[in-house]
Image (cartoon, rainbow, N blue to C red):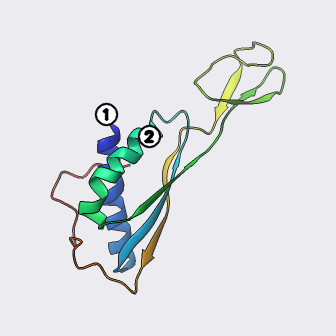
Amino acid sequence: MHEVALVESLLESVHEQLRDAGVVGRVRRLDVVIGPLSGVVPEAFRFAFEVLSPESLGPNCELVIHTTPARCHCHSCGAVSQIVELTYVCPACGSHEVRLEGGRELLLQSIEVDEEQPCDDVPAEPPSQEPNRL
């Protein structure tokens, strides 16, 4: 389940962003964008987040997962079709002259912090591990 490694990278990224911005406080909410072609299973990502985030960010941090559509743009017929799995054929005309647009995202979109309520039980640094990058 590579989602565990991805969540570990996400948590490290959150700490880096907060440190770079000079923000101290309880992280209340993270918004993440996951595309259907990213190879990430949102349910597994959420489960890994629920297991790992309390130790790193403190209790009750909400994870909001947004999805983006993946599209197939056909150079032959001009059709733009929404797709849910990887394809190299135009769903409208069967041409192989297609370009995939979007759907491969895994992005930390926003971090919501309650700066008025610093959390004393949250470590200043994430647990010591080799950082993985998103």
Amino acid type indicated by mark 1: Met
Residue 66 vs 76, above or below: the answer is below
Mark 1, other Cα within 10 Å: few <14 / some 14–19 / many ≥20: few
Residue 25 pos. (x, y %): 35, 79
Residue behind mark 1 = 1
Give the Cα separation between the discs numbered 2 and 1.
Answer: 11 Å
Quadrant in the picture for residue 1: top left
Residue 133 visible within the image:
no
Which numbered dot is residue 76?
A: none
Which numbered dot is residue 43?
A: 2
User: Which residue occupies the foreground of this view, 75 or 86?
Assistant: 86
Q: Secondary structure at mark 2?
A: helix
Q: Is residue 95 left or right of residue 87?
A: right
Q: Residue at x 19, y 51 (%)?
A: 130
Q: Secondary structure at mark 1?
A: loop
Residue 63 pos. (x, y %): 45, 57
Residue 11 pos. (x, y %): 32, 58
Amino acid type indicated by mark 2: Glu
Q: Residue furthest right?
A: 77
Residue 15 visible within the image:
yes
Q: Residue at x 29, y 78 (%)?
A: 119
Q: Residue at x 30, y 66 (%)?
A: 57
Q: Residue at x 42, y 70 (%)?
A: 28
Quadrant in the picture for residue 92: top right
